[in-house]
Amino acid sequence: MSTISQQSFWQLQLRATYTLACKEIKRILRIWKMSVMPPLINTYLFCIIFGKILGSKIGLVAGISYLEFIVPGLIMNIVVIESFNNVASSMVIEKYHHAIDDISMSPMHSLAILIGYCAGGIFRALISGLVTAVLAFWLAGALIQHPLMFIYTFLVTSIAFSLFGMIVGLHATKFDEMPTILHFILTPLTFFAGTFYDIRNLPSPWQELSWLNPIAYMVDTFRYSTYGVTFHSIYLGLAVITGLALLLFIIAYGLLVTGYGLRK
């Protein structure tokens, strides 16, 4: 390729990425009642029932109120579930309707396909997570102490689970495979990530096993960005989050390059 043709090629790839991302974002905006309202209502109920009613009996946890303690985990739960759901469901639906065939047979680069779909997952996590965060922080009366770390943890978590959604979507051949991953893997991992309890209070070996759960580092790092409270080295938490996102990127990109789940 000449320099001009290379430039034209990547300009076309950028336009294709933008078009695919816009398609995903428009789909999310059309179903805003599904993508925004359920997480908002669920978080409100958790804050009222667990945070205020039970929290008044529990007292302080790690020097902060119980409601403040659970808020970061609730927000991370929304980010994980919504980013995963969006990309996985998009892939499965488009495979079912054979719309993915047009994309896979087009000149689109695998990286353009990956970024386009993941942009939708990140956008859905942002609108669901940020709306939920505004409500939860208002109820808890919380202020963000480390805004840059708050943004970084939020974005990298949404990227990681958008990529995981892509991997599951490529692998899935039926609609019921996606809820299976969600309900039997992701939901238990989010609940056992120290969202509702102090991991340090667990007996051995459950305390050590809890730190094998990468979502525990996401919740703990996000809690640190909000309140300055952490139960592990913050550098270790950032390394785990970033490393997981990079690993999932390599796997998802490799699957797209080989055409796994796209070509029959």
Image (cartoon, helix red, strand yellow):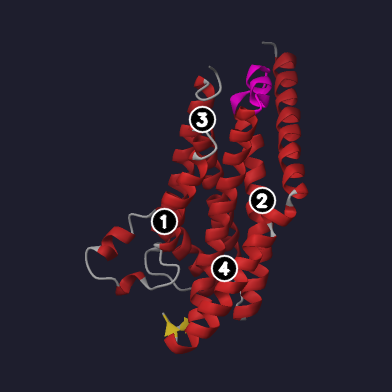
Outermost residue, left side: 204
Mark 4 or mark 3: name the one nearer the start of the chain. 4
The nearer-to-camera label among 2 and 3 is 3
Is 98 or 247 nearer to us in this picture? Answer: 98
Look at the image and tell me whether residue 130 can be seen: yes
Vertical position of residue 118 compared to residue 79: above or below: above
What residue do we see at 71% from left, 19% from top?
A: 9
Return the x and y of residue 105 as percentages of the image width and height.
65, 16
Relative horizontal placement of residue 6, taking residue 231 as reference (left or right): right
The 10 Å Cα crowd at callout 4, few under 14, some 14 to 19, many 20 or more, is some
Q: Which residue is mark 3?
A: 173
The residue range painted magenta reads 97-110
The alpha-carbon separation of the residues under discs 3 and 1 comes to 24 Å
What residue do we see at 75% from left, 25% from top?
A: 11
Q: Which residue is mark 4?
A: 146
Residue 99 lies in the magenta-colored region: yes
Q: Which residue is mark 1?
A: 189
Residue 9 lies in the magenta-colored region: no
Return the x and y of residue 148 as percentages of the image width and height.
59, 61
Question: Label 1 is placed on what type of residue?
Answer: Leu
Question: Label 3 is placed on what type of residue?
Answer: Thr
Residue 124: give its label.
2
Mark 1 or mark 4: name the one nearer the start of the chain. 4
Question: Label 4 is placed on what type of residue?
Answer: His
